[in-house]
Image: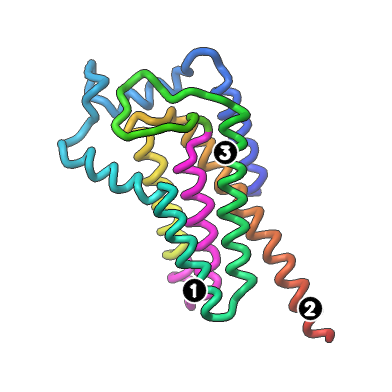
Amino acid sequence: MIVAGGLWGFVAMAEVARDSSAHVFDTEILLAFREAGKPDDPVGPPWLEEAVRDVTGLGSMIVLVLVTAIAVFYFLLIRRGREALLVLIAVVGGQILSSLLKLGIDRPRPDLVPHLAEVQTLSFPSGHAMMSAVTYLTLGSMLAGIVPGRATKIYVLAVAVLITLLVGVSRIYLGVHWPSDVLAGWCAGFAWAMLCWLVARHFFRSSEILAERA
């Protein structure tokens, strides 16, 4: 259901992105993060802008590569090679998919408000939102399968989801993405992370059954 819902949401947002003019849904939300009549002035106290830049860094390429490398080496150290391979496939595959989707839609960055962060790539979908979902949800779901207790599992997954949501919202606040870019990134990221987890679970169970029969 999550994979199907993610795909449906991505297709819906892609239709918005293909419009020649900005959708009212995008413009109203983007301007809601600016002071009335001042598109160059984000809402909130001055320190909030810097704080949001710090939050958006959690979805940057360098941070996600570092987090992924730490997780992969950890699984290798505890002799969980399959889990290490799953993380690599999910993150690397997600990055390739994100790049292909950007080229396929070819949407420019929003020009409604000034950008409060440096950007070079195309706008749709949000790479920060998508790769945060892929990385943190993949690691969160795997960690939830290891830690004891239902409350702890819920906490781990909730933290993964919270970080993903905060990174996506930060991209809108900084004016570097339309809201539909972020929603599409979340949808694609959730769907890809869940698909990788389902495929991995199938192969893990199949290998365990074969090992028991042997």
Helix, strand or loop under label 2: helix
Of the image marks 1 and 3, the number of the one nearer the N terminus = 1
Q: Nearer the viewer, residue 25 or 14?
A: 14
Instruction: Please state, as top left, top right, bottom left or bottom right, where the C terminus lies in the image.
Output: bottom right
Residue 65 lies, with reference to residue 53, above or below; the image says: below
Of the image marks 2 and 1, the number of the one nearer the N terminus = 1
Residue drawn at x 23%, y 16% as measured from the top left: 37
Is residue 147 within the magenta segment?
yes
Name the mark nearer the viewer: 2 or 1: 1
The alpha-carbon separation of the residues under discs 2 and 1 comes to: 26 Å
Residue 137 lies, with reference to residue 31, above or below; the image says: below
Of the image marks 3 and 2, the number of the one nearer the N terminus = 3
Residue drawn at x 54%, y 63% as measured from the top left: 141
Report the disc number at residue 29: none
Residue 124 is situated, as x and y percent measured from the top left of the image, at 52, 31
Residue 69 lies, with reference to residue 99, above or below; the image says: below
176 left or right of 22? Answer: left
Residue 94 is situated, as x and y percent measured from the top left of the image, at 58, 48
Residue 1 is situated, as x and y percent measured from the top left of the image, at 66, 48
Helix, strand or loop under label 3: helix
Residue 168 is situated, as x and y percent measured from the top left of the image, at 41, 41
> Pointers 1 and 3 in contact (CB under 8 A)?
no
Residue drawn at x 74%, y 67% as measured from the top left: 203
The alpha-carbon separation of the residues under discs 1 and 3 comes to: 28 Å
Which residue extends farthest right?
213
Magenta region: which residues? 125-154
Instruction: Tell me the crowding category of disc 2: few under 14, some 14 to 19, or many 20 or more residues within 10 angstroms, Cα based.
Output: few
Q: Main secondary structure of the magenta part?
A: helix
Report the disc number at residue 74: 1
For disc 3, the marked residue is: 99
Is residue 39 within the magenta segment?
no
For disc 2, the marked residue is: 209
